[in-house]
Image (cartoon, helix red, strand yellow):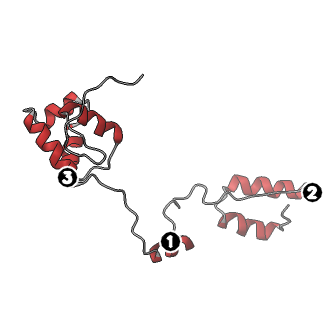
Amino acid sequence: MINVNAASLLVLSSSLGWSRHARVAILAAQRRGEDVETSKKWAAGQNKQHSITKNTAKLDRETEELHHDRVTLEVGKVIQRGRQSKGLTQKDLATKINEKPQVIADYESGRAIPNNQVLGKIERAIGLKLRGKDIGKPIEKGPRAK
């Protein structure tokens, strides 16, 4: 519950960004002797998503580099060799595994963040292992587990 006199309410409400109609309604309620309770939503109606907080400085002081792991160049070269041995272009391989050609280009250049689903599809398409210890070895075709 906030008890505010009329003069300070006008100053306070204008600094909080309340509309004139809201200020008049609050003043009228106060004149009738009703209890007035007001609350302010933090950063409501303002463009404050990029505000600097005290945690920003803490993050700036952080020395640990946080980044996503990328596909190794070894995996990229294996994909490229396997694709070329099958006579496929990047676009052909992408079409075969239902991905965009840029995804294949990113994997071959080592820019992609590894996704096991995509790696599995590429493995099956080129017939070479891309994950685990024996990267570049042919995949043994055995019965699938159900």
| Amino acid under disc 2 | Gly
Q: Residues within 10 Å of mark 1 (few under 14, many from 20)?
A: few
Q: Quadrant of residue 103?
A: top left
Provide the residue designation for mark 1. Answer: 56
The residue located at (76%, 55%) in the rendering is: 24
Distance between the Cα atoms at labels 3 and 2? 78 Å
Closer to the eye: label 1 or 3? 3
Q: Which mark is residue 17?
A: none
Q: Secondary structure at mark 2?
A: loop
| Quarter of the N terminus within the rendering | bottom right
Q: Residue 72, percent across and down?
A: 24, 54
Residue 106 appears left or right of 5: left
- Decide which of 18, 146 is in the foreground and name it: 146
Q: Which percent across, then down, holds residue 25? A: 78, 52
Mark 3 crowdedness (10 Å alpha carbons): few <14, some 14-19, many ≥20: some
Question: Which comes before the other along the chain, label 3 or label 2?
Answer: 2
Pick whichever of labels 1 and 3 is earlier in the sequence: 1
- Residue 28, image x, y percentages: 83, 54
- Could you say whether the residue bearing mark 1 is in a helix, strand or loop? helix
What residue did someone put label 2 on? 33
Nearer the observer: mark 3 or 2; the answer is 3
Q: Residue at 55% across / 58% down in the picture? A: 46
| Residue identified by numbered label 3 | 74
Q: Residue furthest right?
A: 33
